[in-house]
Image (cartoon, rainbow, N blue to C red):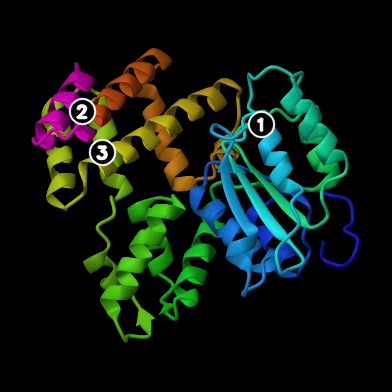
Amino acid sequence: MSGKKSKASKVVSYQEFSRITSCGKIYPVYLFCGEERKLLHDALNLLKSKVLSSTSGSLNFEKVSNKEVHWQEILTNAAVLPLFATHRMLVVEDFFMLELGKREETGQDAAELLTYLENPCPSTCLVLITGPKVDTRKKIYKKILNRGLIVYMRPFQHRAALSWIKSEFNRKGKEVTNDVPPYLLTAVGNNLSILNLEIEKLVSYVGHEQVVNKEMAQKVVAGIAEPQVFDLVDAVGIKNTIKAICELRSLLNRGEPPIFILYMLARQFRLLMKTKVLLSKKLTFSEIASQLHIPPFVARKVIQQTNYYNFENIEFVFKQLLKMDQEIKSNVTDKLTVLELGIIKLCK
């Protein structure tokens, strides 16, 4: 689609996708998979800027959900010629055919998609968006690999996250001192969507100041300090109800939203579960940090916390966190009571 024939297609990271696309190389079909929603959002915006013209872009962009629209209609739309431009872009969300656990593609929808992928429309850029885990053995995956580009939106590792934070400030016209990126990463975690919100808040706060320093960040960033989350998880692990409630109230007193505290707790217990699995496979400390895409000091603490929990405990924690999440989102006025009662149950 770029005017030159593309070389062999690949499975790439977001960073490599960004480099390839910025150079003007466009494929007729993409598979976007992974859990990092901010990268997915940025990848779509970058691709749109390269595929669609500034004057007729809205006419030639379409986004549909695989849950709501049948494949016959999707593929019919994929064959539609662009209006007043050379290319159009069709994004299909909730693409489920490659999810792990789904049966092999034997239905008419899969057959029609395979036929389309054999000879995709050269004027359409088809983007299929799926979850973080895909079945690479399936024919559709292999056909996309042959005809297009597969992009994994994985959380950044520590060094890449630091670089991303700095580049986001630069993109918004600000410089940062060297201690700001590590402070934000420690205070907020490596969820890029949340980091982006904190960066926007900080940029708005400093106004015309050109350089953002750590002192400014400490005044503005309400982000959860991971050490406090560790302390809360530690207290729950040793069944110290009083300390757990104190840590919870400390987080709330800092202005942390209840739903954000639940998110961070769920994130921490997911790390615990994954770490226990990796430890059972005899992976080393450095291998665990690399596999989980977390800084070494975080990996060290998580490994220590695995001593407090078995898999049955963690399953109970997830069920309790889900119940707390549902209660908080059901317009319960006393969210503090929901959190405190939930923490007390976790400590029993």
Q: CA distance from mark 1 to mark 3?
A: 35 Å
Badge 3 element: helix
- First-in-chain label (2 vs 1): 1
Where residue 51 appears, as percent x and y from the top left, is 70, 64
Q: Is residue 170 left or right of residue 207?
A: right
Quadrant of res 258 = top left
Q: Is residue 87 left or right of residue 44?
A: right
Q: Is residue 175 left or right of residue 290?
A: left
Q: Residues within 10 Å of mark 3 (few under 14, many from 20)?
A: some
Residue positioned 81% across, 41% down in the render: 145
Q: Which mark is residue 327?
A: 2
Magenta stretch contains residue 27: no
Amino acid carrying label 2: it is Glu
Q: CA distance from mark 2 to mark 1?
A: 32 Å
Q: Which residues are magenta?
A: 328-348
Amino acid carrying label 1: it is Val
Quadrant of res 31 = top right
Q: Is residue 289 above or below residue 348?
A: below
Where residue 137 appears, as percent x and y from the top left, is 78, 26
* Residue wearing tag 3: 231
Residue positioned 27% across, 31% down in the render: 325
Amino acid carrying label 3: it is Asp
Q: Residues within 10 Å of mark 2 (few under 14, many from 20)?
A: some
Quadrant of res 334 = top left
Residue positioned 47% across, 40% down in the render: 299
* Residue wearing tag 1: 134
Q: Which mark is residue 201?
A: none
Placement of the N terminus among the 4 image quadrants: bottom right
- First-in-chain label (1 vs 3): 1
Q: Is residue 343 left or right of residue 305?
A: left
- First-in-chain label (2 vs 3): 3
